[in-house]
Each structure stands twice: as C-alpha cells, then as structure tokens.
Image: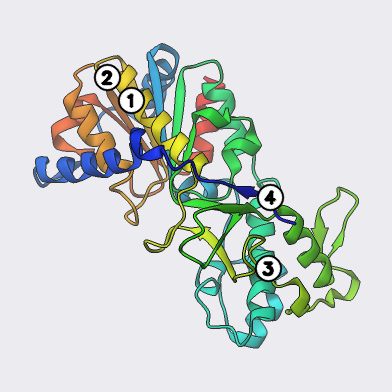
Amino acid sequence: MMGGNTVNRNYAEMPNGYLEAIQKGITGVRRFRPGVSRGTGTREENLARLKNEIGTADAIVIGAGAGLSTAAGFTYSGERFEKYFFDFAERFGIRDMYSGGFYPFPDDETRWAWWARHIYFNRYVEAPKPVYLDLFNLVKGRDYFVITTNVDHQFQTAGFDKSRLFYTQGDYGLFQSVNPDIRKTYDNEAWVMKAMEAQGFVRNENGVFDLPAGRKISSRIPAGLIPKCPDDGSDMTMNLRSDDSFVEDEGWHRASAAYSDFLRRHRDHHVLFLEIGIGANTPVICKYPFWQMTDDNKNAVYACLNYSEAYCPLQIEKQSIVIDGDSGNVIRQLLQL
C-alpha cells in the first residue's frame, strides 16, 4: 500500500512563495531593459569573489535547474538511456528519457514499466557524480534555502535540510490520483521496487537494480501491478507539474510558505542569490525573480553558474558574478579554494 500525503485545507491562509516568485519574475522581466552581460573580471577573480560571498553572506538562496542534475550525471540520453532503455528504443524508436515520458504507449502495462524505470534511475539511485554532495559541503553551516524545478530528490539525498527545500514542480517519488477531488500525493518507492523486479531487473552487490545476465528484461509489468489510488481505486499519474491538475499537497504548501518566510526575514540583508543550471524552460520561477530581488536590494549579489548560458542583465552587472562552465566543475573548484 502506498502511503498518502494529505492536504491541509487551511493552507490558503499561508504565504505562497511559488506565486510570489512568479509575480516577482513577471515584474523583473518588465523592468529590465534589453541587453545582457557575460560578467566582468577573470574566471579566477569571479571564483574567489563567489567563494567569499558564500562565506560572508547573511543568507544564501539557491535556485537550481536541470543543468545541475545533468552535471551530476543524470543525463537523459546517451549511455544511461541506451543501457537501461534499449528495449524501448528498439521497439518504439524512443531516443531519450525525456521524450519517452510523452510517448503514447499501447497499454498501461507498458507505460508503467517505462515509468518504473524512469523513476528508479532518476530518483532512487545515487547520482553518478557527487555534485550535489559537493554543493552541500560548500554551503553547510550557512543560512541557506533551496528552490528548485528539479524533481529527482537529489538535494535531500545529499544531506540538505528538508525544511530548507522547495521542490516547485513535483517529485518523481510521488503519485497522485487522476480524480481531481483527491488532492493528495502517494509515496511510490515500494511500488517502484516491485515493478523493477517484475521487469526482470536484479540487485547487484551494492543493492542497486541492474540488468540481468543476457539483458533479458520485459518492457511490461503484470496488469495487477498497475498502480491504483488507495482511496477510491482510480488511476494514478505522476505528481509532476504539467497543467492545473498538479496536486500541491500539504508538504508542498509548507515548503512554499517556508520559502516566502525565508525571503521576508532576509529582505534588505546581504543575500547571495545563487542560480545554478537554469535554462530557458522555467526562468520565471528562479532566474527572473533572482534578478528582480537583486535589483531591489543594494546589499544583494546575484551569481549565475551555467554551461554556455551564463549571463545577467546589464542593470545588475555590478552586483553579479557570472561563471560559464560545467556546474559540477565550478562547485568543485570553489570547494578547493
């Protein structure tokens, strides 16, 4: 039986950090003039400056996107995909994990076999590279808060304080009912493990599911394993934000309120807004609000770590630190300073 996470119906009285962030983002986009800066100073100077900011800021707000998980080795194509999803690639022509999530599979047995694998290899295994652990060691002991669009749970896995995390877009580890009246989420770990075994995956010496000898696995699960809602028997789906059916459960609202409160308590303080691996898909949640809050606070500093997409608005150039490159390498360099 999957455990349920209920909704506190009084959350409407709590501050909503998510909506506040989006409003800040919209305000920021309207405020900033065209033109961006790729930063000033040498790479060495910017690394030293950022390391100093991490050590001296009153508060650090980390905004993380898909680029951080990519740097940690959670790649959705290439070797990982070809190893664990070769049968789906051969049968359906799927070429990466992202597009596979939208594929119109012929039946639920196949669709849920896909999702069991997708969830397991992006949620219930350690990251191939210690980037999240390095980031934790970099900010450990500081007054930090994390807002992220990532859904792979890697911040908690690395040791970040759960009360300082806000996963805005959901969690691979949660299901929700398709019944819109059931505003709850359900932990899926036990189900995922059963579904992996049913496909023929076997645990290796480290207890991690791997391909069996001969790579003989099934791209279907038994009909009896198709997940159903424990409350009314309705179909289940992933707790991932794609439309207004996304369930924001009690834990989500507590995290949203905590983010709002953290920003309120540190308004006008020396705040480091540290943006890592955020691209153009969801900039209104972290990137644009960070720009706007930096512009509003003369004591704030905005830092952008990104591979080939590191920049800041010209209006906050003097308050910004821009470092282009693999986020994992940059974080490791900062640890070594």
- Seen in the picture, residue 72 relative to 225 is either above or below; the reply is above
**Residue at mark 2 to residue at mark 3: CA–CA distance:** 45 Å
Q: Position of residue 204 (x, y in %)?
A: 88, 55
Q: Tell me which numbered mark, 3 or 1, is placed earlier along the sequence.
A: 3
Nearest to viewer (mark 1 / mark 4): 4
Marks 3/4 in contact by CB < 8 Å: the verdict is no
Q: Quadrant of residue 87?
A: bottom right
| Residue located beneath label 2 in the image | 267
Q: Residue at x 34, y 34 (%)?
A: 13
Marks 1/2 in contact by CB < 8 Å: the verdict is yes
Which numbered dot is residue 8?
Answer: none
- Does residue 60 appear in the picture of this structure? yes
**Residue at mark 2 to residue at mark 4: CA–CA distance:** 38 Å
- Seen in the picture, residue 303 relative to 148 is either above or below; the reply is above
Q: Residue at x 73, y 60 (%)?
A: 192
Q: Residues within 10 Å of mark 4 (few under 14, many from 20)?
A: some
Q: Circle 2 — which element? A: loop
Q: Given the image, on which type of amino acid does mark 1 rest?
A: Leu
**Residue at mark 1 to residue at mark 2: CA–CA distance:** 6 Å
Colour scheme of the picture: rainbow
| Residue located beneath label 4 in the image | 3
Q: Tell me which numbered mark, 2 or 3, is placed earlier along the sequence.
A: 3
Q: Residues within 10 Å of mark 1 (few under 14, many from 20)?
A: some
Q: Given the image, on which type of amino acid does mark 3 rest?
A: Pro
Q: Relative to residue 114, is residue 183 drawn left or right?
A: left
Q: Position of residue 189 (x, y in %)?
A: 72, 53
Q: Circle 1 — which element? A: helix
Q: Tell me which numbered mark, 2 or 4, is placed earlier along the sequence.
A: 4
Q: Position of residue 118 (x, y in %)?
A: 63, 64
Q: Relative to residue 10, is residue 322 drawn left or right?
A: left
| Residue located beneath label 3 in the image | 227
